[in-house]
Image (spheres, rainbow, N blue to C red):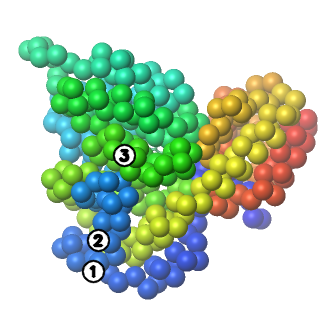
Amino acid sequence: MDYIDLRSDTVTRPTDEMRQAMYRAEVGDDVYRDDPTVNKLEELVAREMGKEAALFVASGTMANQVAVMTHTRRGDEIILGENSHIYINEVGGIAYLAGVQTALVTEIDGIMDAGAVEGKIRSENIHFPETSLICVENTHNKAGGRVVPLDAMKRIHDVGLRHGVPVHLDGARIYNAATYLGVEAKEIAKYCDTVNVCLSKGLCAPVGSVLAGSSEFVERARKYRKMLGGGMRQAGIIAAAGIVAVEKMSKRLDEDHENAMLLAKGLNALEGVSVDVDKVQTNLIMVDFAGTGLNGTQVAERLKANGILINGSSTSMVRFATHLYITGNDVNRTVETVSRVIKE
Ligand SMILES: *Cc1c(COP(=O)(O)O)cnc(C)c1O
């Protein structure tokens, strides 16, 4: 059965154009920097982000982990959101790999208050660790794809500048944020020193993320990537799809956002189901099934029996994600099916 797969935008398979590009890709050994396709992708993303250089890595997690390792020394402290992907969803890598401890800031709709961030910066004291990094996430995954506005980005970046602390942006979905704001991605990335861009989410590439920053930073990051086993050889085969992702797929995300809004409104109209429609900005929506008496796992089971996939858990909240392979028709069918199964 061909499922309507709303679990994540990572389920997107590469497009035909990507497969063609992969087939034709000119390649070389990227550890020797001989792969022209990887080089092209790195230059492209660096330019898109307004940075000097970039590094192709295996995943968004690797991009973030390499970034933290490169920016910090063991025993340092980094400031990040308590609901951030780096803190919640990266297997404790910042502790295990970088050996840093965390100073957590509460986000509201994915946004950290700059004053709260500044309050976490350590002063000079023999008892204190050094604050060596601030991490921001845009769009914010756990907040349901919320966009951190440019002025909020700037305020946090200004805090970093004042205290000499660099800012890393987990921009896994930076193109969704740019699409929502109607700006180029570099207008967002200018408020950070380094940025992670995921190619394998809504942009549909099969594998990979890119970490962009200064040339000096990327040179050092390259070594950490190698340490983690991320020095790939003829990686141009996958980088070729990444080029299509950036050049082409980044330009159509408004369709996913429209479908997400359609889905949000449709589901919110159902008895017992609620979505805060005003909070839907990009391709992720948070749906609360509390009023149906069902938890996420139960809803997921019933939907699966009807050809629709979601990630349910023991709570009543479920994240739905739209992407290239979710059409307006799929949205309608999903709303109809949810309406039916919650009454079963
Ligand atoms: C998915 C995601 C990542 C990690 O990307 P992977 O490629 O799955 O490792 C990092 N940050 C955010 C905000 C994400 O949504």
Q: Which residue is labeled 3 in the image?
A: 189
The alpha-carbon separation of the residues under discs 1 and 2 comes to: 10 Å
Q: Amino acid at mark 3?
A: Ala
Q: Secondary structure at mark 3?
A: helix
Q: Amino acid at mark 1?
A: Gly
Q: Is residue 259 above or below residue 123?
A: below
Q: Residue at x 59, y 36 (%)?
A: 144
User: Along the polypeptide, which appears first: circle 1 or circle 2?
Assistant: 1
Look at discs 3 and 2 and give the one toward the viewer.
3
Residue 303 in percent (x, y) is at 79, 47
Look at discs 1 and 3 and give the one toward the viewer.
3
CB-based contact (under 8 Å), mark 1 and mark 3: no
The residue carrying pointer 3 sits among few (fewer than 14), some (14 to 19) or many (20 or more) residues within 10 Å by Cα, namely many
Look at discs 1 and 2 and give the one toward the viewer.
2
User: Along the polypeptide, which appears first: circle 3 or circle 2?
Assistant: 2
Q: Is mark 1 within 8 Å of ligand 1?
A: no
- 40 or 103, which is in the foreground? 40
The alpha-carbon separation of the residues under discs 1 and 3 comes to: 30 Å
Q: Which residue is labeled 1 in the image?
A: 28
Q: Is residue 166 above or below residue 23?
A: above
Q: Amino acid at mark 2?
A: Asn
Q: Is residue 31 above or below residue 79?
A: below
Residue 80 in percent (x, y) is at 36, 29
Q: Which residue is labeled 2 in the image?
A: 39
Q: Secondary structure at mark 1?
A: loop
The alpha-carbon separation of the residues under discs 3 and 2 comes to: 21 Å
